[in-house]
Amino acid sequence: MKVAVVGLDGACMDLIMEWAKDGKLPTFGELMEDGCYGRLESTIPTVTIPAWNCMTTGMNPGKIGCFSFIQKEYGTYNFKIYSSLVEKEVDIWDILNIYGKKIFLFNLPNIQMAYRINGYMVAGFLCMRDEYFTYPKDLKDKLDKLGFERDITDLGILGAMGDKEHSRRHEEITQSQCKVLENLIRDDEWDFIFLVLNELDRIQHRFWHKRNVVLSHYKNIDRNVKMLIDRILELDDYNIFIVSDHGFGPNKKVFHINEWLLRKELLTVEREDISLGIVRRIITTLKKPWLVKLVRPFLSTALLRRIYQKALNQTAKVPVIWEKTKAFSYGSFGHIYINLKGREPNGTVDPDEYERLRDFIIEELRKMSVKAYRSEELYSGKYMKVAPDIVIQTDEFVSTVSGRVCVDIFVDGFGGAHDRLNGTFIACGPDIKNVGRIDAHIYDITPTILYMFDVPVPRDTDGRVIREILKNGKSIKYADYTTINIRHKIKKLRELKRI
């Protein structure tokens, strides 16, 4: 029994179902016809990180300590990359590795550093150092010789690209990565393959309002997925899963969360000088959709790109006066923290006021049709103490959350935004029934695949085995995998001693 998972960042099941039915996406159409398909519900917040992490562990953010790309360090006002603050999560490949499965991992966003495994591991776009990009290390040389291209992550470069160049480059990157994958897949007899392509997410953020452009990129993915699946099936009779971390929809409204907190007199910031205030206003104006297209041609030089990006970064900084602040937000993902006495360095909120303040904030937000929840309503687990106090859920009204101040509380959005409810789930293969439409949750993928391998499912999983799509009716076995983290720590200590 073998499984290959093709992850498509941001793939929208609603679009796939529509265009596959019309014959515009023949590969997706054939996979859906041969097996099962439906919407995959994502996480709250609906962001790449933690969505991929939750998918590959089967657990909610409270159990793995991953709530967003950047998180507040407990007891400080510092925000850091999430993985620097918590233990390494136990992913599906860590479990399969224990059972001797041959594994090939490629470009998963939640792999920031490649490490030893029984097979190949190529880190995702968050990996910043070449020496940690692949396992084994010499796999990096092979990637270079094959012409591998990494995803473009520099917002300055992306912002300065014209529409045609932006579209063309993302198609080229997908094609480059898939040609590399064609070669690497031949290197061994893999039991488990998990690869991710990011093209659809990048394109839909910019071109959601241009349906013909979005369709052209779904067609590009459809062609390349066929090429990959054909190559995989040449090796063996694999079960194929197509999944996404979230779906997509229109970016209707941007909510400036810190500006709202400021107007509610819950947040106090330093008085800015006139020049910075003018810069903020200019940048806010330049970000309006009708001006973005006008400005882009003038950002062709490296100098202008740096100036523009610096100005954008300035507008995102919020100089908080902590001694006069009751609540604050990092902004980008809708997390609100209470400035609690005894927990924060300059806390102002007494513990007996904590719940009343949370209730007040949530109720006031809901009066404006902004959905907000206490973190314990959404999460559970050992990392709850580092969870945000309040979490905003993006929906059909608020599509994006921003931390900027000195702007309107709400502004019209542009392009596309993540959608929690229309992620992609497709499965077919020798062990999967042809049952048609069935919806699932992002937590369900890992327990279902482990069950298919006849490997015990983590006892504390939040997902379920989607047994109704599987031909085998065996009982589910469970196990405790916390020892994996202990082994990982021992390995790291040994590596440090060798340095």
Image (spheres, rainbow, N blue to C red):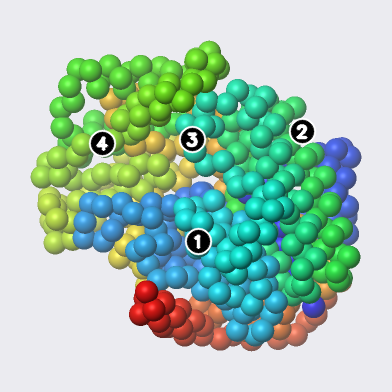
Q: CA distance from mark 4 to mark 3?
A: 20 Å
Label 1 or label 3, whichever lies nearer to me, is: 1
Of the 4 image quadrants, the one containing the C terminus is: bottom left
Residue at numbered disc 3: 155
Q: Mark 2 falls on what kind of element? A: helix
- Give the mark, 1 or 3, whose residue is nearer the N terminus: 1
Near mark 2 (Cα within 10 A), the count class, few <14, some 14-19 or many ≥20, is some
Residue designated by label 2: 216
Disc 4 marks a residue whose amino acid type is Val
Report if the CB atoms under discs 2 and 3 are less than 8 Å apart.
no
The amino acid beneath tag 3 is: Leu
Q: Position of residue 154 (x, y in %)?
A: 49, 38
Q: Does the residue at mark 2 contact the one at mark 4 (Cβ under 8 Å)?
A: no
Give the distance between the C-alpha atoms of the residues marked 1 and 2, in whole angstroms: 36 Å
Q: Residue at x 82, y 69 (%)?
A: 238
Q: Earlier in the sequence, mark 1 or mark 2?
A: 1
Q: Is residue 412 left or right of residue 5?
A: left
State which mark lies toward you, 4 or 3: 3
